[in-house]
Image (cartoon, helix red, strand yellow):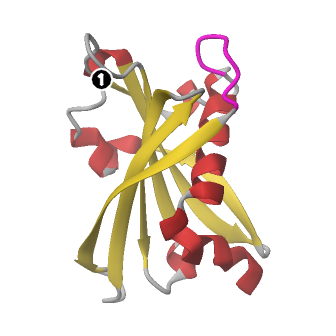
Amino acid sequence: MVGGEPAEGLAIEAAGAVDLGPCPDCGTDTRRVWGHVRRGGDPFAAYFVEWTIGRPDHGAFFDLIVGDWGEGTSSADRWGCSLDYRIIEGKGAFMVIDSSQRPLASSNLVGNLLARRHIIGTERAGAVFALVDAVLLQEPRIGEIRSWASEQ
């Protein structure tokens, strides 16, 4: 929940994509896609998903920017957080991580980066996990990431 409202009826709008070049650890290409999440037709969040192609052992990063968008709003009206998606015992799992080392930290779209302790155990946690679930299930360009759990 964000602001006391349940995070339901989320719809994904795919936007951009970029190949980031080779992974410094393995040399395989890394990709980032991004888009928007709407709730009830209104802008609710932006997302960025980054992964190394063909390397489920590297996992994927999901960065979120949540809050008010549109005319009359600014980055001060939005907060951000990052999650690491890994395959554990054949199943996908998300873990909230420190955003300060992610590209999100330098984004002019977000006013406040939230640490793990500001998400887990708070009412924001429901919204965060609903958002990443919606992105994982609906984002058409990350089918590879969805397939990782079934490959194990």
Q: Is residue 27 left or right of residue 124?
A: left
Q: Residue at x 34, y 76 (%)?
A: 30
> Is 2 situated above or below 45?
above
For the stretch drawn in magenta, the main secondary structure is loop
| Depth check, front residue: 112 or 71 | 71
> Is 133 situated above or below 58?
above
Q: How far across and down, in percent of the image, does residue 107 sit?
A: 23, 39
Is residue 4 within the magenta segment? Answer: yes
| Depth check, front residue: 11 or 33 | 11
Q: Which residues are magenta?
A: 1-8
Q: Residue at x 69, y 59 (%)?
A: 93
Q: Residue pushed farthest front?
A: 41
> Is 16 situated above or below 76?
below
Q: Is residue 62 left or right of residue 150?
A: left
Label 1 secondary element: loop
Q: Which amino acid, mark 1?
A: Gly
For residue 11, which quarter of the picture?
top right
Write down the residue under mark 1.
Answer: 111
Q: How far across and down, in percent of the image, does residue 145 sit?
A: 58, 72
Q: Which quadrant: the C terminus? A: bottom right
Q: Which quadrant: the N terminus? A: top right
